[in-house]
Image (cartoon, helix red, strand yellow):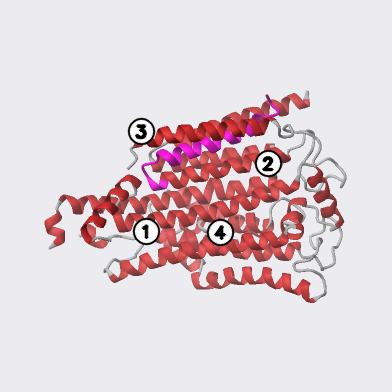
């Protein structure tokens, strides 16, 4: 059994070693802000060749599309695991006779008003960020999270019931899976057309047009649907855990 | 100094996060410390790709061919952030599970609880 | 001149970010830590904007400054209740064991 003091000493030795090696490595790295980025230059050239104005979007969904699919499934699996863990907790509690109910929240009227006004604006911005992922900063990941968090303004503006009406969880379960599936289907469609898996086979359009860069906007929407639903589902389960009234303990 | 400052900052954030993890007496605090450790990689990646007098790699208002920073490391950082967030969510869900099972989220206390129960029913 | 401004801005943000990261770790009260974490996420997002990474900054601001701190707060509120219940049970063991 190691005491806290031994643990600290061990940490100090380890951290000192890592710090030393890290500093030695950093001194030989190319300096911060230096002008030569051979990989970056090639990725930018490829993005322009594919008529994708947002080079980051091009790298994520076109040049590294396969990696992003892996990332998407990591997200899918992690979200699923979190949901399963919390769902199991809830069913145990229901079996033990605990109740889940949520009253109206104690919120300033001004906050309510802001929530009410900002809700549609935020959802609009989220949708905009998703579909413009190929031509401006943003995309499926960012827009999906904006959509998911924006939806929770309904909780501030109204109460938990309003939020529940706004986000039917079974539907979101399906949307999440559909998003992940669409990504894979786009990949196989490219394969079927004779190109490689997830190759950008659609017409590339004109640089900075909304419908440019081939499959990139399509994949952005798929990822947006998946990420948005996943975040809403995770937040829903966490909210449920935090807001559960423990009837037995209060009685 | 300026040429290595961001790398050193990333190294510092990594180590201070590790310190938090090593000395944490609260699992939620440990998860947050892990998020801090992970955030050091965002900084390291973006610092490697930054180029002086260049703009963001988005050709909305600038012509293709203008100097831009490296988009590859930015895409990697994006992946990093999204995966990091889901991992944090999973770990927090596990923490809730631990709190429910053991009634504490102090790693030391959980260890001693497990030793006690191990002695009792010989697991 | 332009270069000097960039240097000062980036240098300042870097030092501030590293200091805030330290504050996040050294804040041992988990509830307060969530707020410091949110501030850290915001600062990291600003640094990303300064590093010409708007895509990443957008993800960091939504995820790092909003979603993760929110999850942390929700998890804390749940965990605290479990810990309190456990303590109460330990204080009067006979009543609960029956």
Q: Residues within 10 Å of mark 1 (few under 14, many from 20)?
A: many
Could you confirm whether marks 4 and 1 are on the same chain? no
Q: What is the CA distance from the residue labelled 3 to the residue labelled 1?
A: 29 Å
- In percent of width and height, residue C2 lies at 77, 26
Residue A148: give its label.
Answer: 4
Which quarter of the picture shows residue A86?
bottom left
Which residue in the protein does label 3 denote? A5
Q: Chain of mark 4?
A: A
Is the residue A50 above or below the residue A171 in the image?
above
Q: What is the CA distance from the residue labelled 2 to the residue labelled 3?
A: 36 Å
Is the residue C7 above or below the residue A100 in the image?
above
Q: Nearer the viewer, mark 3 or mark 1?
A: 3
Which quarter of the picture shows residue B41?
top right
Q: Nearer the viewer, mark 2 or mark 4?
A: 2
Tell me whether the residue at label 2 lies in contact with that at label 1, contact meaning CB atoms closer than 8 angstroms.
no
Which residue in the protein does label 1 denote? B97
Q: What is the CA distance from the residue labelled 2 to the residue labelled 4?
A: 26 Å
Q: Residues within 10 Å of mark 4 (few under 14, many from 20)?
A: many
Question: Is there any visible trace of residue B9 in the rendered image?
Answer: no
Which residue in the protein does label 2 denote? B46
Disc 1 is placed on an element classified as helix
Read off the magenta span: B1-28
């Amino acid at each position: 059994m190691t005491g806290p003091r031994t643990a600290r000493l061990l940490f100090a030795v380890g951290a000192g070693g890592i710090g030393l090696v890290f500093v030695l490595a950093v001194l030989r790295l190319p300096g911060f802000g230096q002008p030569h980025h051979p990989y970056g230059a090639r990725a930018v050239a490829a993005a322009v060749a594919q008529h994708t104005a947002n080079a980051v979007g091009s790298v994520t969904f076109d040049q590294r599309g396969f990696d992003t699919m892996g990332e998407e499934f990591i997200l899918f699996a992690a979200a699923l695991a979190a949901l399963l863990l919390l769902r199991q907790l809830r069913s145990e509690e229901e079996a033990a006779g605990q109740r889940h109910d949520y009253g109206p929240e104690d919120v300033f009227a001004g906050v309510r008003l802001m929530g009410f006004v900002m809700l549609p604006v935020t959802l609009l911005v989220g949708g905009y960020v998703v579909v413009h992922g190929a031509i401006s900063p943003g995309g499926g990941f960012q827009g999906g999270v904006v959509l998911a968090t924006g939806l929770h303004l309904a909780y501030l503006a109204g109460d938990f019931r309003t939020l529940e009406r706004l986000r039917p969880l079974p539907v979101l379960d399906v949307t999440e899976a559909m998003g992940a599936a669409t990504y894979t289907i786009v990949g196989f469609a490219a394969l079927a057309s004779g190109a490689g898996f997830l190759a950008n086979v659609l017409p590339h359009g004109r640089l900075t047009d909304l419908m440019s860069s081939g499959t990139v906007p399509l994949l952005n929407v798929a990822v947006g649907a998946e990420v948005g639903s996943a975040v809403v589902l995770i937040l829903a389960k966490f909210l449920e855990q935090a807001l559960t009234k423990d009837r037995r303990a209060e009685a | 100094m300026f040429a290595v400052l961001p790398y050193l900052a990333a190294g510092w954030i990594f180590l201070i996060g590790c310190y938090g993890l090593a000395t944490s007496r609260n699992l939620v605090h440990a998860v947050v410390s892990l998020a801090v450790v992970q955030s050091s990689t965002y900084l390291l990646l973006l610092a490697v790709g930054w180029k002086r007098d260049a703009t963001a790699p988005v050709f909305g208002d600038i012509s293709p061919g203008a100097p831009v920073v490296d988009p590859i490391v930015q895409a990697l950082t994006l992946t990093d952030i999204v995966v990091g967030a889901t991992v944090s969510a999973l770990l927090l869900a596990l923490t809730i599970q631990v709190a429910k099972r053991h009634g504490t989220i102090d790693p030391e206390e959980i260890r001693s609880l497990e030793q006690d129960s191990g002695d009792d029913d010989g697991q | 001149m332009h270069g000097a401004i960039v240097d000062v801005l980036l240098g300042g943000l870097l030092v501030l970010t590293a200091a805030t990261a330290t504050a996040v770790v050294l804040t041992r009260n988990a509830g307060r830590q969530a707020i410091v974490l949110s501030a850290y996420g915001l600062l990291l997002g600003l640094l990303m904007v300064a590093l010409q990474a708007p895509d990443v900054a957008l993800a960091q601001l939504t995820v790092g400054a909003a979603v993760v701190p929110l999850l942390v707060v929700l998890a804390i509120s749940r965990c605290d209740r479990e810990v309190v219940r456990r303590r109460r049970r330990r204080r009067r063991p006979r009543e609960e064991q029956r």
